[in-house]
Amino acid sequence: MKVSVEQVYTSVACNRKPEVVDWNYDGIICYGACNAVVVCDPNEKTKDRVTVLSHHTGHVNSVKWIHNHNGQTTELLSCSVDKTAVIWTLQNGCWNVTSILKGHTEGVTNIYGNYHRDRLTIYTASTDSTIRVWERIEGTVTLKQSISLHSGLCLTLHAQILPCANKPLLLCALDDHKIHIFVGEDYHRAHTLVGHEDWVRGLDVLEVDNDTIIVASASQDTYIRLWKIQKVKAQPESKLIKVEEKVFHAYDNLWSVKLEAVLAGHEAWVYGVQWHPYSFDGPTKKPVYRLLSSSLDKTLIIWEPDSSSTDEGVWVEKVRVGEVGGGGLGFYGSRFGPEGMSFLGHGYNGSFHIWTFDKESEQWSPSVVCGGHFMSVEDVAWEPRQGRYLLSVSADQTTRLHAPVRRSDGSVAWHELARPQIHGYDMSAVAPLTATTFASAAEEKVIRVFTAPHNFISNFKNLVGEVLVANNEKGPEGASVPSLGLSNKAVFIEEQGGSGAGDDGDGYFAPVDMKEPPTEETLVQNTLWPELQKLYGHGGEVFALHAAPDGTLLASAARATDATHAALVLWETAKWQQIQKIESHTLTITQLAFSPDSQKLLSVSRDRRWTLYRRLPGSSRFEVAATSDKSNGVHSRIVWCCAWAPDARMFATGSRDGKVCLWAKSDTCTDTSLKEYALHGSPLEAGASVTALACTGRGERCVLAVGLETGAVDIYRADDWRLLHRMDHSSAHHLTVKRLTFNPKYEGSDETLLASAGADHVVRIHRLKITY
């Protein structure tokens, strides 16, 4: 038996940091996501657009492309709270760590790099109150200078090569509201730009000519200031009144500094600012006087000089776009795309918003981009039976639906198509019941059931080419969340036209006829599913859910510290009634799993035990068929996960003790609690805590996917524990694997899809080709 693995889809949002996203001239986006660096190519058509680079052991704070003298970007920089910075280099089509910068005693918050005389100079700032200057010569990186800020902190930094001097100038915004200029081989402080009344969070420099640069600074005082730094030339004295100029010495020249303009238009902290990319007339580089800014007021603005004004230094906003609806807190940063024909903003919730200029309409319109959850993904589940879409729930309080979209050229690419639930509590579990219904659980005592609206079903058909339900004429068109509410209320389209949100008209929803995957704005506002039912029956926060494959039953369990609250609850889905409560465990049930034939139910718990329930003949009720205890359960720590074999004759359990056990019926079993079940073969020693399991196969030949606390996913042949494939941190996850599940559509086939969810905020789908 052999297994080959191919990456199909990766979904993850960026971190909540101002400088955690960068966009290069080739149109490739890089960003920090949890502890990883993600490289996303929006133009990729043949494979997954996203590549995850795992190395850091803490959250990534900043990433930057390195542009060499030819404008190429085959290297990038990243820095992290793990006190290190890293140089990534593209070698033979793969990104590799070529240098690790160690020396800071606290987390590295900012990083910047540029080439000077064929030498790469890197600047890193840290919460240890230092800025370190590194130099790479012939592949070796050495520490050139350490600049002490005493007790100060550097909030952002930028380095620029002064054209006429061909020497570096370092700009650092400190927590004293000032921008400090460092020059010379020893990087001494030459000047300070004073004017902002709060922290400066963004810096960028435009090279005007050989003697002049313009520094743009963005501050939490809501203003953007433009500073012109110019080489002083000998001029005859003039009696005309001029703007005050400050001067400083650098590299045997005198430089003047004057305030060129103050841009006022934002109403909240301004976190990001960037100049438009240079235009090129052959080899000649020309500046473009266009500036992009991002703010927590939920807007992005493009500024340009006022062509109608005769005065210098008058800038006006030419474009203003913003985030619509949702619970976000504005934009943390923004970047121009190639040639400035598009730009993106990244928000508080890790979302990406891209606008592209349409030459025909001469308007900026939203575009589709990568994205995903911005906190730990707790559960994923396929649509029952046919597996046409994947649902995921996260501690970011959202439920997201992912599906393969057919492009006009015939290719297929996975996208997030809907956000059925945007909740007020951290999500914990999801259980699809039918093609158009699912139940979800969060940190509350209620289970919520949702049904697909008409607008989603029609859009799913348009984009995926699949009909979820034949008769789709009746029912709600969409859903909206009322002010101060947690329940998605149905929206019906009136016969006269228009829309109304529920019965009281609160909230907002507009039907959308999608021809391409939805933008972030559409996902937030117009893809909610109406809530069908609330199920009350638990005394604690619901932690685990699973639905019978035939869709008739739903099992649930809650957080518990005693047998009463740890009871398993069964619900029938025809009338949404509680039909049974079964006590077996004494602590929280960590996972529930119905057998493929819906005749058995398995539960595993923090009490280190598993329990098997058997369906009574001709009934929807269950009875305890077998259960483990301390003497025969094998596991010595929490049992985190379980999975059924496709033929339902065998099941697996995985534990914090690193063991995976197979259990099956046995004629020789004499244990009273296990009854006719016994350990099948020897346990697998996985070497780390086992947190997720999934099983597929053909007949008795089973393949078991094992997810570990380390983030790795191993694929084993179940009968002899032969390792068939290992997915490392870059191809699987770099933090705990929360859930693994095989697509039911491909059961028994030589090819299948494996979905995984991790505490690293990532949802991934891999295609497995199995040679039996």
Image (cartoon, helix red, strand yellow):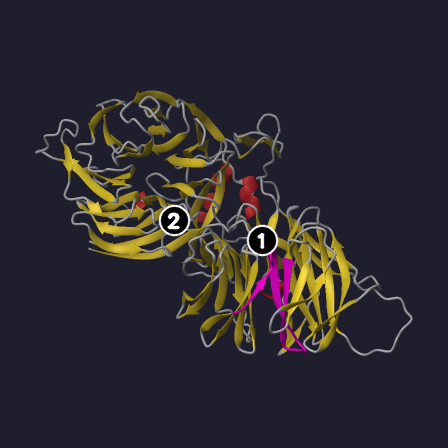
Q: How far across and down, in percent of the image, does residue 66 sit?
A: 53, 68
Q: In the rendered image, which quarter is residue 360 located in? A: bottom right
Residue 324 on image: x %, y %: 62, 43
Q: Residue 74, labelled with which disc?
A: none
Task: Look at the image and tell me whether residue 81 can be seen.
Answer: yes
Determine if the magenta segment contains residue 177. no
| Screen quadrant of the N terminus | bottom left
Closer to the camera in the image, 150 or 614: 150
- Using the numbered discs, state the Cα–Cα distance from disc 2 to disc 1 in whole angstroms: 23 Å
- For disc 2, the marked residue is 735
**Residue 275 appears anywhere in the view:** no
Give the percent coordinates (x, y) of residue 768.
30, 53
In this rendering, the count of numbered labels is 2
Residue toward you, 373 or 585: 585
Please report the bounds of the magenta region as a residue range: 144-173
683 displayed left or right of 446 = left
Q: Is residue 151 magenta?
A: yes
Residue that lies at the very extreme toward the right in this rendered image: 239
Residue 117 to residue 667: above or below = below
The residue where tag 1 is placed is 18
Q: Is residue 759 left or right of residue 310?
A: left
